[in-house]
Image (tube, rainbow, N blue to C red):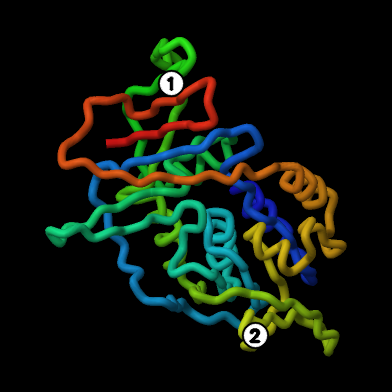
């Protein structure tokens, strides 16, 4: 998922760039059970990003549109803006985050509960991404998730503690903190509450891509477009999200791998308790269709 952004960064050194399709891979792959999370107390870290549209400096260079403000789109947009390109991000949600979004609920006493009901944590599998995560950790955007992990066999009732604990990371104070911070990169604009439903090539002069919203609003012209949302990709390029516009063998291979991933729809139950529960941080239930993830 993050690899797509790094790959695009290298590709943008090309003088002329067509549409690049790099949908973020579903966090729940085929066969993965449902994950359920209860919000946790985390170190405090705050980034002001309450406005619906965040603007940075303008650039006279290539204009790039990024569709999707999840982790793939946010990383990609931030890297491109840092290279001096003018980048505009469109997302149908109320803010950045995508699968890493956070939900807030107010209770009767006026207090606010925060739930990371999408991605509860993430792991790193490559040195390139690890370098990026190390930077986030130095900024206080992410932290190691230290807890008790294990699995429960529903059929036998046997609980087994996880011995070789793999490193897990969480956003601080929520999973969407990473995307929020990336959206503040100078040279980047983010527009939320907009669903991109139209993409047309205007072959005038050097040519450009024209984007339109679901409501018919003209969203502008861009030299390059990155589709970092699988739902938007299906809407723009058909049910299979395949596109003849992909160029480069690396991108084609990456697209094939992403297209082969099957999403596993799930329901997330958000619960809060008046006092912490004396339970493990992660409880994986084997032998049933659910995967319980509890953090407190």
Q: CA distance from mark 2 to mark 1?
A: 48 Å
Q: How many marks?
A: 2
Of 52 and 291, nearer the camera is 291
Image location of residue 210, percent across then percent down: 72, 82
Left or right placement of residue 139 versus residue 11 in this view: left
Left or right placement of residue 7 versus residue 165 in this view: right
Q: Residue at x 73, y 60 (%)?
A: 21
Confirm whether residue 141 shows in the render.
Answer: no
Residue situated furthest front in the rendering: 155
Do the residues under discs 2 and 1 have CB atoms within 8 angstroms?
A: no
Query: How many other residues sit within 10 Å of disc 1, few (<14), some (14-19) or many (≥20)?
Result: few
Name the residue tied to disc 2.
220
Image location of residue 103, percent across then percent down: 36, 57
Task: Please say if 94 is above or below 55.
Answer: above
Image location of residue 226, percent across then percent down: 68, 65
Of 106 and 126, nearer the camera is 106
Q: Residue at x 54, y 70 (%)?
A: 92
Q: Earlier in the sequence, mark 2 or mark 1?
A: 1
Q: Residue at x 15, y 62 (%)?
A: 110
Residue 23 lies in quadrant: bottom right
Q: Residue at x 42, y 39 (%)?
A: 36
Image location of residue 170, percent across then percent down: 39, 42
Query: How many other residues sit within 10 Å of disc 2, few (<14), some (14-19) or many (≥20)?
Result: few
The C terminus lies in which quarter of the figure? top left
The numbered mark at residue 165 is 1
């Amino acid at each position: 998922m993050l690899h797509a952004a790094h790959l695009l960064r290298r590709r943008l050194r090309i003088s002329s760039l067509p549409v690049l399709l790099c949908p973020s891979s579903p966090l729940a792959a085929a066969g993965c059970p449902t994950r359920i999370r209860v919000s946790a107390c985390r170190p405090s870290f705050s980034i002001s990003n309450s406005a619906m549209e965040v603007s940075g400096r303008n650039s006279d260079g290539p204009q790039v549109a990024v569709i999707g403000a999840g982790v793939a789109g946010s990383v990609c947009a931030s890297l491109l803006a840092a290279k001096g390109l003018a980048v505009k991000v469109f997302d149908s949600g109320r803010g950045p985050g995508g699968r890493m979004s956070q939900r807030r609920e107010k209770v009767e006493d006026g207090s606010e509960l925060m739930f990371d009901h999408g991605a509860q944590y993430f792991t790193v599998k490559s040195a390139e991404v690890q370098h990026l995560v190390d930077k986030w950790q130095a900024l206080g955007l992410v932290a190691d998730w230290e807890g008790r992990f294990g699995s429960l066999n529903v059929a036998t009732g046997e609980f087994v503690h996880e011995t070789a604990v793999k490193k897990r990371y969480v956003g601080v104070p929520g999973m969407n903190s990473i995307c929020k911070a990336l959206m503040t990169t100078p040279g980047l604009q983010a527009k939320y509450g907009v669903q991109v439903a139209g993409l047309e090539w205007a072959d005038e002069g050097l040519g450009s891509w024209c984007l339109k919203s679901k409501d018919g609003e003209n969203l502008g012209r861009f030299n390059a477009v990155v589709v970092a949302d699988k739902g938007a990709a299906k809407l723009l390029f058909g049910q299979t999200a395949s596109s003849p516009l992909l160029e480069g063998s690396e991108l084609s291979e990456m697209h094939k791998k992403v297209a082969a991933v099957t999403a596993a729809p799930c329901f997330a139950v958000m619960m809060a308790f008046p006092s912490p529960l004396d339970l493990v941080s992660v409880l994986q239930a084997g032998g049933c269709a659910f995967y319980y993830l509890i953090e407190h």
